Image: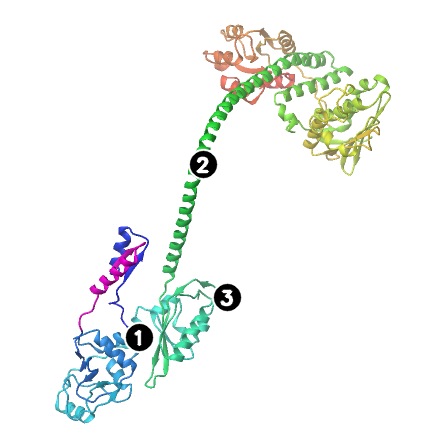
Amino acid sequence: MRSTSRLPVIVVSGRGDETDRVAALEIGADDYLVKPFSQRELVARIGAVLRRCRPPELSTVLDVGTLRVDTAARQASGTGVLLNLRPREYALLEALARSPGRVLSAEQLLELIWGASWQQSATVIEHVYRVRGKLSRLPTPDSRLPTPGARTADHHGARLRIPSRSVRAAMSTSRPSSTPKPVPDFRRLFDSTISPLLILAPDFTIVEVNRAYLTATGTRRSIVGRPVFEVFPDNPEDPSADGVTNLRRSLETVVGTGRTDTMALQRYDIPTGGEGGFAERYWSPVNTPVLDADDRVTHIIHRVEDVTEFVRLRRAGHERERASAEAQMRAEGMEIDLFVRAREIREVNEQFRRVNGELDAAGRQLQEEQRAKDRFIATLSHELRNPLAAAATAATELLALDLPGGHPALSVLERQLGILARMSNDLLDGTRALTGRLELVPERMDLRSAVESACADMRGLFGHEGRALDLRLPDDPVLVDGDRLRLAQVLTNLLSNALKYTLPGGRTDVCLSCVDGQAQLTVRDDGIGFEPGQAEELFGVFMRAAPAGPHTPEGLGLGLAVARTIVELHGGRISAHSDGPDKGASFGVLLPTAAPDAPQPARPAATGRAQRQLVILIVEDNTDLAATYRALLERQGHHVTVVHTGADAVTATEAGLFDVVLCDLGLPDMDGYTVARTVRSRPHGAGLRLIAVSGFSRGTDRTLAHEAGFDAHLAKPLPLADLLGLLER
């Protein structure tokens, strides 16, 4: 292996910053050339580097160990005869010529000729002399001059003078020998080498290995004696693995030619353990033969270097370069696009500014309209709740007290006023009714009672113009867990729909039954009917079976949509069917039934007198509702005072004579929040119970009431049981 230490090196790169130039020069480069460059500059730089790196004139006579070599005459002389030289011996002369005037040891000579594999040979002089079996030992250190009796051999013009046996014998007896040097421990030297080395037989069996190789491959000395491809097979999970093929080809080349084979950088995964795993590895292998005296290969030195980290770094560098190039290309493209479209962007920005101004104005207008709508809905709900609360309280609570035995009209008033109260609550959130987010108040109930009451409420309407309403109920209870008012509303909507689309003299049948553990409610009429494909559309919002016209029944087309929402909230299904126009229609409702043995809920008993008497102040601007509340509370044994403005309430509470204050939030002079804060700010205000009773019942209204100091917030119309229960706490 020839040395390359004197080989001139010029680094050519597209990177011209100072860091790259300094790094290249520090690692041994003679010059640094930055792309692009001209041919003239390249020729000039190469000439300059060659002049600087020109080796000095070599001496023709060299002293090497016990030999004197004349390179001009190609003759090696000493105390002996000339020896025929082979190509490896010429390599020795060439290596010696590169080290003029030096006296080298045997190990240094081996380093010059064999490189890293010198540890596998005997001393260099023995190797050179034994190539042809001419001598059995080295000349003595004093045999530097020609001696009579020497033999001479010539081979290809190379002359090497070596002492004869007789001369050597005489010299050995007449001259004292020098002190012998200790023989190096080649086993220790081999095992201490930092390069990973593996010794193979010509049949590729492992015969020796050093510690560096075992460490690099994660193996143990037990691999000695095994075939190398059995120890290091290809990774079976990598279909493209070719490590075994490439290594076998290189080893066969070394055995066949007797020459060193340097392999290209090679991926060769190594086993990681007994579970069949492999670790990714990259190697730089060199396979060197060891020859005997007849140039036959006796062993192969397999030297490797683990370059996995280098490959990964290079791969990462390539990826970074590729990403950088792609980013640069994208940047250039973006720059071109920005340049071309600059005017368009300016025009679009002008349009954006104009549109944004319009959107801001529209947004402000929309917010104002939203606030106005909220105020309108809240006010409307409040105004509806006041008369509704007065009517409901007077019709239900007072009549229930006056008629403990009940009255047929009382139940009708209760149901209808309850529905009106629930509808007024839904008015606060119109989207809740359209999106199916109505709130339910479920209870265990007999569905027969809800169906019967709904039919009773609608029977009077069917009596007009000769229409008939027929009801069939089962003998056994039909128990369901549901909202009584909402389920009655479903049937009311279906009956109202049948009434609208049934001609005078028509007939509507209502049937309730139990089928397969489900309650089945059917409403069938002989009205105008509809196209069969229109059945699903009827349950849409604002959809009606009859086309618009002067004879179209009144309505918004929300009844069936609301009915479907209520049924689905109860876990049921609703469907429609018709055989065609003028063939009538049928609507079916399926609801899950409750346990058969569940008791039927009993009607709440009439409320008795309160257990303790309280002094109560009622602050209500609606005089009818205030009088109703007063009558109800006085019948319970409480002492009641009524005022109609916030100022009167503030004045009345100055003396602190009241236990409870029922205060409306929407007062004419000041709101109920101000009244509550004023009362709470007084020394005796903490002892009063403040209850807000108002038509404003949104979540924000309840939060504001709590922050103002109210202990509770009740929505109108106020059930007497809820109020009395709150007063008894």
Q: Which mark is residue 236?
A: 3
Amino acid type, mark 3: Pro
Q: Going by the image, does 476 lie left or right of 65?
A: right
Dot in front, 1 or 2: 2
- Picture layout, residue 31 above or below residue 191: above
Image point 42% across, 41% down: which residue?
Answer: 336
Q: Which of 18 and 416 is in front in this view?
A: 18
Quadrant where the N terminus sits is: bottom left
Element type at mark 3: loop
Give the position of the C terminus as an image quadrant: top right
Q: Which x, y percent locates residue 292?
A: 33, 84
In the rendered structure, which amino acid carries the disc numbered 1?
A: Ser
Q: What crowding class fits label 1: few (fewer than 14 Cα within 10 Å), some (14-19), or many (20 or more)?
A: some
Q: Mark 3 or mark 2: which is in front?
A: 2
Q: N-terminal of the two: label 1 or label 3? A: 1
| Mark 3–mark 2 distance (CA, rounded to whole Å) | 55 Å
What percent of the width, then of the height, locates residue 324? 39, 49
> Which residues make up the magenta segment?
31-57
Residue marked by disc 2 = 341
Establish if 641 lies above or below 304.
Answer: above
Which residue is more in the foreground, 306 or 273?
Answer: 306
Q: Earlier in the sequence, mark 1 or mark 2?
A: 1
State the CA–CA distance, disc 1 to disc 3.
33 Å
Is 55 included in the stretch rendered in magenta? yes
Q: If you read the primary sequence from the N terminus, does the residue marked by circle 3 or circle 2 appear first? A: 3
Residue behind mark 1: 117
Residue 728 seen: no
Question: Image quadrant of residue 186?
Answer: bottom left
- Residue 370 seen anywhere in this rendered image of the structure: yes
Percent position of residue 104, x then y: 19, 76
